[in-house]
Amino acid sequence: MVDKSLTKKTLRVKIILFTALFILASVSTFYGTRLSLPIVTYYGRGALTTLPATFTFAIPLFTLIILTIYSRTGSVAKRWKIIFIYSLVMLAVALINIVDILLVVGLLYNWNFIVGVMTPIYPLDLLIFNFIFLAIGAASLFFAIVKKTERQDLTTDETKQTPKKRLVLTGFFFAFACYYFGEALFGINNLFEGYIDSNIGLTIPVYLLFLLLAAMGLVYIIYFHSCKEKQLKRGLIGVISILAITAFLLLWILIGFAINPYYFSESLQEEFAMGYALKVPFGLFILLGWILIPSLIALIRLIKQAKQLKKEAKN
Amino acid sequence: MKTKQLLSLGLLTTLLCSCAPSNVIYDLDEYQTDLAWKEGFTVCQLNDLHLSTSSNLREEFEYFRNIISLNGTEKPDLIVLNGDAFMDANREVVTQTIDFFDSLEIPFGLTYGNHDTQGFYSSNFVNQIMLEATHSIYKNPDSRGKDNVFGRSNYFVNLKEGNELKWQVIFMDSNSYYGGNYDTIHDDQVTWYERVILESNGLVERPSVIDETTFAKSLLFFHIPTPEFKTEIEDFKTNHPGVKSHEDQYCDVRENISSGINKNMHLNIMKAIGEYHSTVSIGIGHDHINNTDLRYEDENGWPFHLIYGMKSSRGIYHDPDIIGATFYTLHETKETNEYGHDVYFDLKMVALQYGQDISQGVTIWSTKA
């Protein structure tokens, strides 16, 4: 995303925009995933009422991924294509959701638009969100069609070519990072519920570990694909720091287990992933350990890029 | 740099020390509720409601209202939500459900299952709402979990006539997971159970001789089966192949028994029951399509019922022909049934499908002819 041509100001604006969108996507991804879970655990019962929420809460994450792909695409033709596809998806999702919500309201809720339970003013809030998505979809479609013919002056930026495989991996990374960041926010919010859990000192490293994934995302956005050695060095320092903090937090969690082997089931079971991981032998350690993987991949790639740069400089 | 390191180390030590398990001993009063005894006191056990954000609460509440009336009496005297009332629920679902049971104006209690804390709320939320409900008999003296009894839903009801203790209903938290398995009742909970039996009956120490008249009789409710359920069911199946009932025992087991294991625990609740001769029945849930009423007898020669209660809603997996409610009707004096067994209460399991009228309820097992 970041290249030589970016000024400091533009970079700052992009970081703020991506951070804001990341936080929004995190909250909605976490909420949407948890709301959608009963579709699986209840064998599809309630799907008609739950699916609009699933799709609605997935939109911010989808937007984040599309924006990331867009910003890493140099080809003008491909950029128009991305906007076009985004518009179509937004329009389709919004229309399907609106029809579904109206059906549910008519069939199940006797045309009552505020039932609550799933969200505070469900399904009215979902309906409003989907009309907003409809407007965004229509606007971006208009932009994709009209501006495409107006802006023939745009040229392909060769420095922004990202392989498809890497883009897919980025999508997956954002999905997981957003979910875990949302979980961390949810857990931290629970800490302020008005009572102090006896395991509070042991739950904190778990939430911090989740937040680290988001920090990794930020390092990824800022420093990857940079052609400057200085930027790459900073990226390397960032990733190594994250790895060190991750190791420290994992150690903290292990000490926590030695103090109270039941603290996960006592105080962290409300975290969906925790609850299910507790059923699997070593599930928790697999769950927590995988947080190291993105950092390790990032470290390897940054080292490779740095080596490449050095080679180029020599030549 | 040194100061910073020292500060960090200090902060970490404080945080870790704050997590050390606490062992505050509370008076038993803090776990106790008294209710008036009457002959034929009826307890209605509802298992595994599994209410979630996708549940249609209006329909569910209508169904619950129907099944608690299935015993034929006007209404039960106590309702027990015996674990997994909630799964993937949020605050609204929990609040509305507890408000619904509160509105029935029948005392009601709740034991924690392995799913009740898996929702859009903190692990304390269900506990807090239960403590606030008007007709709830749920007790937990320390919501932070700092008392010396593991888990949350460890409390009991004394059924009294004047000052005389007639019966007890004891609730325990069978906990959730440990080491990739379901957890069991912990040693400190077993010790607490013994204390409940002794002190409620006006004793401080266990008498050297205990017989069936030493303590008032009690029902015990928790969610996850103990391993003894499995061995007893296997015995029944081996001895009575191909039948669901034999004499005064019933065994309709359609799925594996997922009991808890925890190698760190040394005391066994079943052994304690056998030693004290107070508890006459254990009511559990957890496995949704298993229903039993088996007689278990350990080396102490104290027989008690192992009851897999009926699942009470259509939440997650279930067999529609065996969802409903389980009723216990308590008696002051024991009778001896035709098989020579002592009978302290009548048991009835009644199934009702969604959308059916109460009159269409099917009694799948009853100890009373």
Image (cartoon, rainbow, N blue to C red):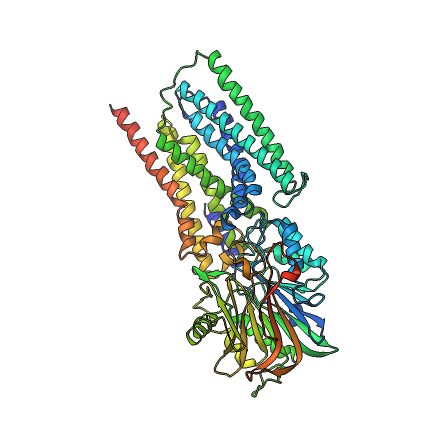
Question: Which residue is at a point 49% across and 69% down the rendered structure image?
Answer: B226
Question: Which residue is at a point 45% across and 29% down the rendered structure image?
Answer: A68
Question: Which residue is at a point 39% across and 21% down the rendered structure image?
Answer: A74
Name the quarter where the C terminus of chain A is drawn: top left
- Is B291 drawn above or below residue A192 in the view shown? below
Most extreme residue toward the left is: A315
Question: Which residue is at a point 43% across and 11% down the rendered structure image?
Answer: A153
Query: On the rendered structure, is A108 left or right of A213?
Result: right
Is residue B226 visible from the viewing direction of this image?
Answer: yes
Judge by depth and name the residue closer to the eye, B320 or A88.
B320
- Is B68 drawn above or below residue B235 in the view shown? above
Is residue A193 visible from the viewing direction of this image?
Answer: no
x, y percent for residue B294: 51, 74
Judge by depth and name the residue closer to the eye, A84 or A286.
A84
Q: In which quarter of the image is residue B360?
A: bottom right
Query: On the rendered structure, is B221 left or right of A149?
Result: right
- Is A263 drawn above or below residue B275 in the view shown? above
Most extreme residue toward the front is: B360
x, y percent for residue B64: 64, 58
